[in-house]
């Protein structure tokens, strides 16, 4: 499976989330970043790359805690 579209889409979404963070648009930034990080988890699984999976699962945990906190 060609992962180029998934990894570039995830990277663009994640970058958009970082821009939202810089502009202090909260909690939308968390949801956007969560989507980008989730895409990268899928890329890591497809590539069987545990370092990509690890860092992005950590990101999911952190973003999820922020989303729960924002409620």
Image: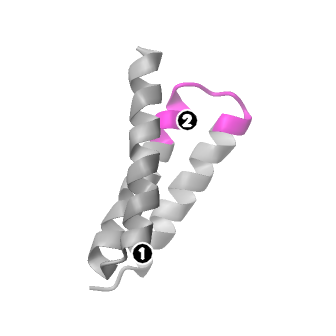
Question: Which label's residue is closer to the chain start, 1 or 2?
Answer: 1
Q: Please tell me how crowded label 1 is: few (under 14), some (14-19), or many (20+) other residues with Cα within 10 Å.
A: few
Write the start and end of the magenta stretch as one range.
21-32
Q: Residue at image x 43%, y 68%?
A: 52
**Quadrant where the image shows the C terminus:** top left
Percent coordinates x, y for residue 56 in the rendering? 43, 56
- Label number found at residue 5: 1
Front residue of 51 and 41: 51
Q: Quadrant of the N terminus?
A: bottom left
Mark in front: 1 vs 2: 2
The verdict on residue 39 being magenta is no
Structural distance between the alpha carbons of marks 1 and 2: 22 Å
- The residue to which callout 2 is attached is 29
Q: Residue furthest top?
A: 71
Task: Reply yes or no: does residue 31 show up in magenta.
Answer: yes
Q: Position of residue 10 (x, y in %)?
A: 46, 61
Q: Residue at x 39, y 34 (%)?
A: 64
């Amino acid at each position: 499976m060609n992962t180029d579209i998934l990894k570039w889409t995830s990277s663009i979404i994640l970058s958009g989330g970082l821009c939202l963070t810089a502009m202090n648009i909260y909690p939308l930034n968390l949801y956007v970043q969560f989507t980008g990080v989730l895409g990268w988890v899928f890329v890591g699984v497809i590539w069987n790359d545990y370092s990509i999976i690890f860092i992005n699962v950590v990101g999911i945990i952190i973003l999820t805690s922020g989303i729960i906190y924002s409620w």
